[in-house]
Amino acid sequence: MLTFSSRSENEASGVRHRGKTLVDFWNGNRSEARQQYERLVLEAVLEATGAAFGDWEIQESLEDYPGDTESQALSGKGHDLLVTIAGNQKFADDDMIVVPHPLTKNLLGYRVLIIREEDAEAFAAIRDVAGLQQKVHGIPMTWSDAGIFRENGFEVAEEGDFNDIFDRLADGRFDYSAFGANEVLGVFANRASLREGLIMDENLLLFYPFPLVFYVRPDKPELAGRIHTGMDAIVASGRLDELFNEYYGNIVEELNLPNRTLIVLDNPLIPEEYRHLAPNIENLNP
């Protein structure tokens, strides 16, 4: 795994490319809310670098790659880049270029539970990590957070995929599933609510470092340079904050984050440069 270096950035940012750059962006295996936001961030990055790098066009794939085939999205399927968790173990054996700028202020690391309505009172009584460890967490096969919960002493039912997880929750195969604050409302509205008897828990808020970053194919260093330069630009201009606030500016109030019982977990899989991330709900406000 290669973290993007300043030397590569300087070399790449000094080159103006003629013609149009076609960017093959894989945006599958995630919620609709994440797909929309991450596409907009990529568009902003490419727009911000147009003067130095030229015109661009995104070729987006929303195809889902089940199980371990997700790890082949770049090396095997031929896509140029994707957004994933920093330190994602699925790509640990590949020399991907990681652009280290987080896209969403670690919002994916704030996790809200979806549970069965009949269990609402039991979850409302949970006050600490020990209480939640008595419940079974359902996670689709190969999702990155399964290992995090196991390392923190949780029982995990890792099976199936994103399309059937709420069928299994409603059928009592496990007790809850947790999703990032940036996606849980959409996940509930578009998926979980279609199964009778499921609700969003109103009591708990989990947190662990879980930043989303761009991964680029190792044979695309100029594209990685453009993404790195563009992320620098939209952070400096405030455009990334604008996008975040447009999509998530009301999330603190909508999910009542300050008044939930906060449970902080360790993420032993996260690269060292992100281990400083700590819960800071105030930082999520516009």
Image (tube, rainbow, N blue to C red):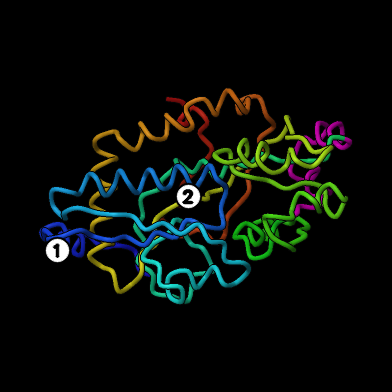
Residue 138 percent location from the top left of the image = 75, 54
Q: Badge 2, how many Cα within 10 Å: few under 14, some, many 20+? A: many
Pick the front one: 39 or 226: 39
Q: Check the picture and name the quadrant holding the N terminus.
A: bottom left
Q: What is the secondary structure assignment of the residue under circle 1?
A: helix
Q: Measured from the top left, where is residue 61 in percent x and y?
A: 46, 59
Q: Which residue is mark 1?
A: 11
* 138 left or right, relative to 143: right
Q: Is residue 254 above or below residue 53?
A: above
Residue type at tag 2? Pro
Q: Which residue is mark 2?
A: 211
In the rendered structure, which disc, 1 or 2, sits on the residue that comes first in sequence? 1
Between 18 and 105, the one nearer to me in the picture:
18
Classify 10 Å Cα crowding around label 1: few (below 14), some (14-19), many (20 and above).
Answer: few
Task: Note whether 104 is above or below 219 in the view shown.
Answer: above
Q: Is residue 158 magenta?
A: no
Q: Residue at x 41, y 54 (%)?
A: 213
Q: Which residues make up the magenta segment?
A: 118-138
Amino acid carrying label 1: it is Glu
Question: 166 or 107: which is nearer to us?
Answer: 166
Residue at position x 44%, y 60% in the image: 26
Please tell me the numbered disc located at residue 91: none
| Secondary structure found at label 2 | loop
